[in-house]
Image (cartoon, rainbow, N blue to C red):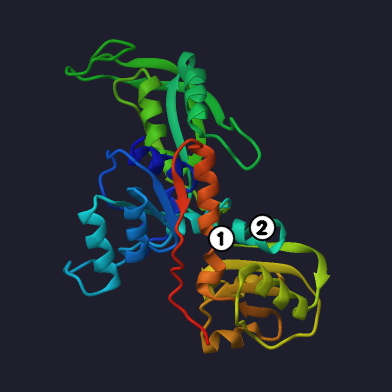
Amino acid sequence: MLVKDVIDFLNSYAPLDYAEDFDNTGLMLGNKNDKVNGIIICLDATKEVVQEAIDSNKNLIISFHPIIFKGLKKLSPGNYVNDSILLAVKNDISIFSIHTALDNSIKGVNMKLCEVLGINNPKILMPKTKTIKKLTTYIPKKDAENLRKKLFGIGAGSIGKYENCSFSFEGVGTFKGNKNSNPTLGVKQKDTEVEEVCVNITFLKHLEEMVLFGLREVHPYEEIAYELNTLENINENIGMGMVGEFKRAISEKELFELIKNKLGSKFLKHSKLLKKPIKKIAVLGGSGSFGIEKAISVKADAYITSDLKYHDYFKAENLILLVDVGHYESEQYTKNLLFDILTKKFPNFAIALAKTNTNPVKFR
């Protein structure tokens, strides 16, 4: 198995196309064509984790957070980023990060957090727009069905719970090839009319390259007329955070005990207690202050996230209970999620969770 095989699988599970613009995801170090001896999974590819990989003869690290986040101006020992990279390079260790691509996946970080906390029927809290594209093309009537089948096979035409969705209408196409043309229908330098079908199919943007390849493979024309448009439609399956419900309403005290028990949070920071039952709950693993207003707008009783600042707590406005559980605590089960999906995909391969606790925050 090659590094590329692992990357391709993870990219199919949580496409890197949906990572945030500020993020740095993908293969941080290494060659995608290298053979994989084993995989180690972590939140942060620290020097200690790299050493774990070396000691256990595993040469691919799957890290949630990117070890390289900003541009490097020099690469010499002296800080945790450089030390990790130098040790990895010296020992031919590849490092791949999935970060906000997994944050934005409906099967990602926040789904796992909901599962751990017992939150039912979770839905994306902040669905994204501009992740859906539409292809419009014009093709001879006799070839239209083959095109639809080809694109459906790639994954185009899926809308929510429905597959093989398209819209088509018939018309007459006209064209005249110049003296250098080689038309498959008609004769060069003569006006030609062809019974055509206008085919419209939507698809997720990470499929664009494959959709265009499929179009060129099936379409008979020398020059293919087509349009690609990015739609403003909300994508309910891609976005940050999740919102769901407990089976029964619980008290604020019970919520705190649940969080401490399930996430191991030693200390919780929270906004003013509202002294009301908690049933509808929003979550966002990692830094989530930007989701407060949305959590309020969907009428969540509480919002679980991390890295809230002093003034963020004022935004509760006596409408919601804000709970900061800690950055590491909110994302720790991401390792388990990655381990589960990788061992299911590659059941006979050496895959392990890093033993190093990479949480840089300590308590007294």
Is the residue 173 above or below the residue 101 in the image?
above
Q: Mark 2 and mark 1: span between their CA atoms?
A: 10 Å
Q: Position of residue 43 (x, y in %)?
A: 44, 62
What crowding class fits label 2: few (fewer than 14 Cα within 10 Å), some (14-19), or many (20 or more)?
A: few
What residue is drawn where x is 32% and y is 48%? Answer: 59
166 relative position to 28: left or right = right
User: Which quadrant of the structure image shows residue 75?
Assistant: bottom left
What crowding class fits label 1: few (fewer than 14 Cα within 10 Å), some (14-19), or many (20 or more)?
A: some
Name the one closer to the observer, 274 or 65: 65
Q: Position of residue 194 (x, y in %)?
A: 41, 16
Name the one closer to the observer, 179 or 223: 223
The residue where tag 1 is placed is 333
| SS for dot 2 | helix
The residue where tag 2 is placed is 115
Q: Position of residue 147 (x, y in %)?
A: 47, 22
Name the one closer to the observer, 131 or 31: 31
What residue is drawn where x is 32% and y is 60%? Answer: 51
Of the residues shown, which amino acid type is indicated by label 1? Answer: Tyr
Q: Position of residue 200 (x, y in %)?
A: 51, 33
Image disc number at residue 87: none
Name the one closer to the observer, 91 or 252: 91
107 relative position to 177: left or right = right
Mark 2 touches mark 1? (CB < 8 Å): yes
- Toward the front, the furthest residue is 55
256 relative position to 312: left or right = right
User: Which quadrant of the structure image shows residue 89?
Assistant: bottom left
Quadrant occupied by the N terminus: top left
Nearer the observer: mark 2 or 1; the answer is 1
- Toward the right, the furthest residue is 248
| SS for dot 1 | loop
